[in-house]
Image (cartoon, rainbow, N blue to C red):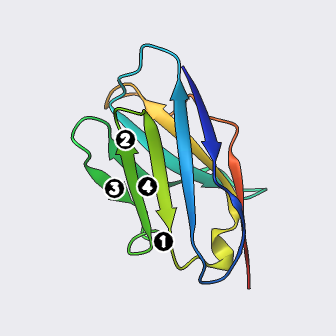
Amino acid sequence: VLLEESGGGTVQAGGSLRLSCTVSGHPFNPYAMAWFRRVPGFEREHVASITWGYGSTDYDDTAKGRFTISRDKGQRILYLQMNNLKPEDTAVYYCGSRPDVVTHYGNWGRGTRVTVGS
């Protein structure tokens, strides 16, 4: 199974972007999927996650109220709608999956870069 992120770009502060993560390969039935991001020199950090079956969501405090994670189970696509972007959101965004509640997220894609100008 491969994950491929897309939708990154450069926007001004206050702008919006919609990231997509497309799944290819079989079988694919994860417990959950998530968006993480990484700034050079720092560790990858959790942004938002969603359980694949029920669609329960969880957000980092920095994303609450601005970002929305969703998934299309039929098309096997994970989304991250990002509104009111801030310069501190600048990072490479990755999608990942976890097969069960015990295993950490992994199977990362290559990432998509988001740059927010002030």
Front-most of residues 10 and 41: 10
Q: Disc 1 versus disc 4: distance between alpha carbons?
A: 10 Å
Indicate the position of residue 72 as horizontal and vertical percent values.
37, 41
Task: Classify residue 58 by image quadrant.
Answer: bottom left
Circle 1 residues within 10 Å: few <14, some 14–19, many ≥20: few
Q: Nearer the viewer, mark 1 or mark 2?
A: 2
Residue identifier under label 2: 72
Q: Which mark is residue 48?
A: 4
Indicate the position of residue 10 as horizontal and vertical percent values.
74, 68
Q: Residue at x 68, y 44 (%)?
A: 111
Give the mark nearest the N terminus, 3 or 2: 3
Q: Residue at x 35, y 23 (%)?
A: 29
Give the mark nearest the N terminus, 1 or 2: 1
Q: Disc 3 versus disc 4: distance between alpha carbons?
A: 6 Å
Residue identifier under label 1: 62
Q: Which mark is residue 58?
A: 3
Residue at the far right in the pictured view: 40
Residue type of the residue flagged with mark 2: Asp
Residue type of the residue flagged with mark 1: Thr
Kindly indicate whether the residue at mark 4 contacts the one at mark 3 (C-beta within 8 angstroms). yes
Residue type of the residue flagged with mark 4: Ala
Q: Disc 4 versus disc 2: distance between alpha carbons?
A: 16 Å
Q: Is residue 59 left or right of residue 56?
A: right
Could you tell me which quadrant the N terminus lies in? top right
Kindly indicate whether the residue at mark 1 contacts the one at mark 3 (C-beta within 8 angstroms). no
Up/down of 58 relative to 106, above or below: below
Q: Disc 3 versus disc 2: distance between alpha carbons?
A: 17 Å
